[in-house]
Image (cartoon, coloured by chain):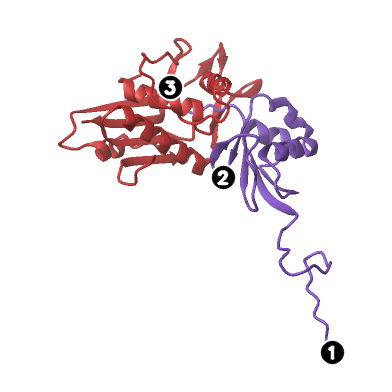
Amino acid sequence: MAAVELKTGNGDAKPVGNATTSSVNVRVLFFARARDLTGTADTLLEVTSGSTAGDCLKELIARFPALEEIRECMVLALNEEYTSDSAVVKENDELAIIPPISGG
Amino acid sequence: MHNDQDKNLIEILDGNVLVDIAKYTNYVSDPQAGAITTFSGTTRDTFDGKTVVELRYEAYVPMAVRQIQAICSSARATWKIHAISVAHRLVHHADALDACKFMIDELKATVPIWKKEVYSNGEVWKENPEFMERRSMEPAGKAVDAPNVACRRICCGAKSKVSDESTACEMNLE
């Protein structure tokens, strides 16, 4: 008899119905001074499901310590809207680091 | 919120494209309009005694367009406006009637566009005081309703200007 085993992506067999992913992937954009400090215009961040924008920022500063310079004067945008640190990020969300702006 | 039937033309222009003022004026022109107000921002060639050799702009374009749309909606909530056209040229600002001034203030406080001044001996990313003030009042930085009080000054004093235009805001009022 063939035994049917359901596998998740990481190879562990899990019962049907446990569809929760343990992490989400978020695309992060760096603008202006933020890009100068990180050396890149964008990066991918993998964070635990349920993480907030603030959690993402902590992770980004751990990865790019130079961002500390603008931590107090930056704001965050999630999916093209200004957001607070407590907003929960979802799979494929786009987080932007917004340093002080100078348009107009 | 943003009404799809609102007559708004919003463009973020590449630096190589000249602002065609006539295009924006024509967009807002209408026999039922009582007035057309225009604000054209220009760039300066000196700052604090230093000569600016180059201005570089960048923008988070989709969010910038979204924010300008929100500003148009806020302006419409306070003034009867028939049509609005806003062009921001990313090459490398501010006073007309109250509605136009409000919109430029809001743009400086919330729209994600950045400018870097490049001097012969260094460079700096400029920071709008309007953004810093707004951030201390309202962390999320959302566009706010138009104030009833007289608008505050933006400009930081007389500077020489070059004729090349970076921002045009045209609207007509019913």
Q: Which residue is mark 1?
A: A1
Q: Which chain is purple?
A: A
Residue drawn at (29%, 40%) of the image: B23
Q: Are marks 3 and 1 in contact (CB under 8 Å)?
A: no
Q: Which chain is red?
A: B
Residue drawn at (79%, 39%) of the image: A63
Chain containing the residue with disc 1: A
A101 or A77, nearer to the observer: A77
Label 2 residue SS: loop
Instruction: Name the mark on residue B14.
Output: none
Q: Quadrant of the N terminus of chain B?
A: top left
Could you tell whether A67 is left or right of B81 in the image?
right
Few, some or many residues within 10 Å of mark 1 (<14, 14–19, 20+) = few
Name the N-terminal-most of marks 2 and 1. Answer: 1
Q: CA distance from mark 2 to mark 1?
A: 50 Å
Q: Quadrant of the C terminus of chain B?
A: top left
The x and y percentages for residue A85 are: 65, 34
Q: Which residue is mark 3?
A: B162
Instruction: Name the mark on residue A79.
Output: 2
The x and y percentages for residue B16 are: 46, 40
